[in-house]
Image (spheres, rainbow, N blue to C red):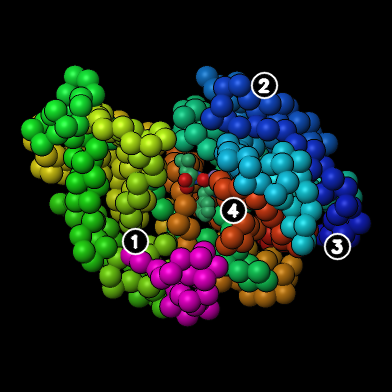
Amino acid sequence: MSDALRFVDGNLDRFRAELYDFLEIPSISAKSEHDGDTRAAADWFADKLGSAGLTTETVETEGHPIVVGESRTAGPDAPTVLIYGHYDVQPPEPLELWTSPPFEPTERDGRIYARGSADDKGQLYMHVKALEAFHATGTPLPINVVVVAEGEEEVGSPNLVPFVQAQAERLACDVVLISDTGMYAKGIPSVGFSLRGLAYFELHVHGADSDLHSGEYGGAVANPVNALARIIASIHDDEGRIAIEGFYDDVIEWDAATRDTIAALPHSDESFARDLAVTELSGEAGYGTLERLWIRPTCDVCGVLGGYTGEGAKTVLPNHAMAKVSFRLVPDQNPDRVKELFEAHLARVTPPGVSVELHELHGGRPWKASVDGPEFEAASEALEEAFGARPVPMGGGGSIPIVVEFEEILDATALLVGFSLPGCNLHAPDEWLPIENYEKGIGALVRLYAKLGG
Ligand code: BES
Ligand code: MN
Ligand code: MN
């Protein structure tokens, strides 16, 4: 393994230059005008996987392709690790808020700025370089590896579960290793112990047949924008709890040990609020910030639409309003059940004179790890050796819906080893990845593969 680690150290500049090539491809899965770019990113990635010594296949789907790489040289008695990540990225808009263009990777202050640097091309590519280090130095890879890189994670992975089900034998593995989350703080690496699930809806409120003069009709005809505001306001109570009947029925009380671990993490509400330029933090009563982020469910309206929003005043009574409503879920909540509960809530709170329509956008179940297994320990040791600090367990506020499916379909243990940092601007303008994490992280992965191989 020391040859492989030396190889990493001697090739870091090239590793970074290659990542820049990857980041230059605008693989925006949500936008069909970028389908060619998304395909190009898949091809580019498959080519690099091949150079790292894996046999590769680009599997077609109804959407963007899935790139599969395999290395079976460790033999049938060695463990098999499935490495999952995504080569697609979120749309970069609003472009004017980027300091340097999203698809022109730029270095500033020890950071790589580009869309996808942290989520997830940079992190995915770290695995390719760690694999290459074994291959290029003739160091036997002690684990069998299956890489699965999808191009639809940011649009809800519509084709991934069917693929995993159809190819369950080929994808059979002991561990699913994912680098698509973050470290707790600079210099403090982390192993993930949870991810929230997601139930995401588009809510439409309809009123009259057409827009109306707000003086001629206002007061006698229901206004869908007013109604939507009332509906949204009804979702939370004054304590920041979700006021949907039955919503908390399936929410587990987290074990005391995890809550103690969370409480012991270095955290300051004041600096957290200051970094975000908010006057104070707010959320569910009775829970600390990290608990609110990691182990408690939420509801956030991600967007609203309705009525006249152009210049000046137009006295109009609109006939339609829309909101994008997202629930983050925790074990053992289920997105289908949340949909039923939300529908029942809507039936109760929708004001007279309007009708509502609910469409499901994304759904994903929450995930919770057992933090005492040998894989967790292997990851902790590898990270400690590479970063020089003992990793802390970390919850994930975001969602990677495939994690639960992988565990269930493949009967494997998921292991989340992420390298972004809080503030890396995932999905936002000026996304970045620390160069230090990219470089040390590759070394950590080399060590982790070795440890997982026993
Ligand atoms: N990598 C993120 C998920 C993530 C980010 C987990 C930070 C933990 C910490 C992933 O690419 C993502 O953005 N997922 C989406 C869900 C998906 C269904 C669109 C999300 O969480 O909004
Ligand atoms: Mn991601
Ligand atoms: Mn993402």
Q: Earlier in the sequence, mark 2 or mark 3?
A: 3
> 10 Å neighbourhood of mark 3: few (<14), some, or many (≥20)?
few
Q: Which residues are magenta?
A: 261-283
Residue 173 lies in quadrant: top right
Q: What's the CA distance linking mark 3 and mark 4?
A: 34 Å
Residue 261 in sight: no
Residue ID for mark 4: 425
In the image, is residue 197 above or below residue 36?
Answer: below
Q: Earlier in the sequence, mark 3 or mark 1?
A: 3
Image depth: mark 3 or mark 4 in front: 4
Q: What's the CA distance linking mark 2 and mark 3?
A: 40 Å
Residue ID for mark 2: 36
In the image, is residue 214 above or below residue 419?
Answer: above
Which numbered marker is on residue 296?
1
Residue ID for mark 3: 2
Q: Amino acid at mark 3?
A: Ser
Q: Amino acid at mark 4?
A: Asn
Residue 159 in sight: yes
Residue drawn where x is 72% and y is 74% of the image: 388
Image depth: mark 3 or mark 1 in front: 1
Residue drawn where x is 75% and y is 36% of the image: 24
